[in-house]
Image: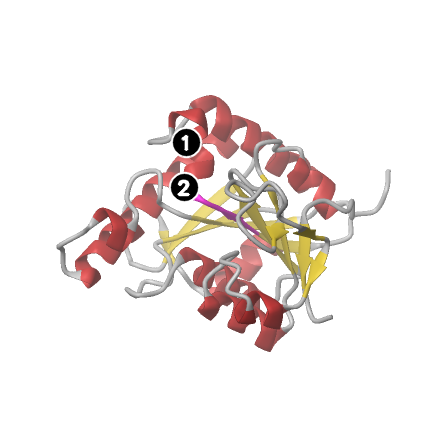
Amino acid sequence: MKEVKYKRIILKLSGEALAGDKGFGIDKATIMNIAKQIKTLNELNVETSIVVGGGNFWRGKKSGVGMDRTTADYMGMLATVINALAMQDALESLGVFTRVQTAIEMRQIAEPYIRRKAVRHLEKGRVVIFAAGTGNPYFSTDTTAALRAAEIEADVILLAKKGVDGVYDSDPLLNPDAKKFEVIDYKDILNLGLGVMDSTAASLCMDNQIPIIVFGIEQPENIVKVVMGEKIGTQVKEV
């Protein structure tokens, strides 16, 4: 079998990706399809960690209009914990050893985030799911993915998107002539305001030279294909 290109990865999943066509909550078939791809990576000895969003339940300041921003963001962090536990359950039903680590301590249901412990889990072949964002308001789960990738020295961030299969120069849903990039520099993401990920996350990846691959999650098998080195989606790196 072809060798994997990346040995330690962070897979960033949006909450919407777990909702499937329902748009809200968790779609069992969708999350199981994603879990099966992660199991394949685990069997290939790829050290896999996951950062999950919470947009299928709560979208921070968008859902909490009129609320205190800090409160709304903490509610969003709790939504990511729901998704993390659901993903853990799906993976363990397939026989994949999994640990959820949360940035907000809740010992009854998950481990607190400890960098050295997370790395040790990965070395032992366990999938680690990072939940509750960074534990701080005003930071997105994209920033969480960038931060955790730097901390655990991940080879790449896989940014699995719903509704788009890469980075375009304009919104492909609004502009049928939008141009898709195969490779793009971090600086262009920031300067052009392309909205792939928030500026804090993009800057953190740029400063730490962490490559990002943006691709569509509608076909979950893309996760394995990207790790095997197939050219899918858009690669964000220093050009």
Indicate the quadrant containing the C terminus: top left, top right, bottom left or bottom right. Answer: bottom right
Tell whether label 1 touches label 2 (CB within 8 Å): yes
Indicate the quadrant containing the N terminus: top left, top right, bottom left or bottom right. Answer: top right
How many numbered discs? 2
Q: CA distance from mark 2 to mark 1?
A: 7 Å
| Image spot of residue 14 (x, y percent) | 45, 44
Q: Is residue 138 magenta?
A: no
Question: In the image, which residues are magenta?
Answer: 11-15
Q: Label 1 belongs to which residue?
A: 19
| Image spot of residue 134 (x, y percent) | 37, 63
Mark 2 element type: helix
Q: Looking at this view, is 101 or 124 the one in front?
A: 101
Image point (34%, 54%), residue name: 132
At label 2, the amino acid type is Gly
Residue 106 visible? The answer is no
Residue 193 visible? The answer is yes
Q: Residue furthest right?
A: 1
| Image spot of residue 76 (x, y percent) | 28, 50
Image point (62%, 31%), residue name: 219
Mark 1 element type: helix
| Image spot of residue 222 (x, y percent) | 67, 38
Q: Main secondary structure of the magenta part?
A: strand
Q: Is residue 4 left or right of residue 193?
A: right
Q: Looking at this view, is 162 or 109 the one in front?
A: 162
Image point (26%, 50%), residue name: 62
At label 1, the amino acid type is Ala
Q: Residue furthest bottom?
A: 207
Image point (13%, 54%), residue name: 66
The image quadrant of residue 74 is bottom left
Q: Label 2 belongs to which residue?
A: 15
Q: Is residue 191 above or below residue 63?
A: below
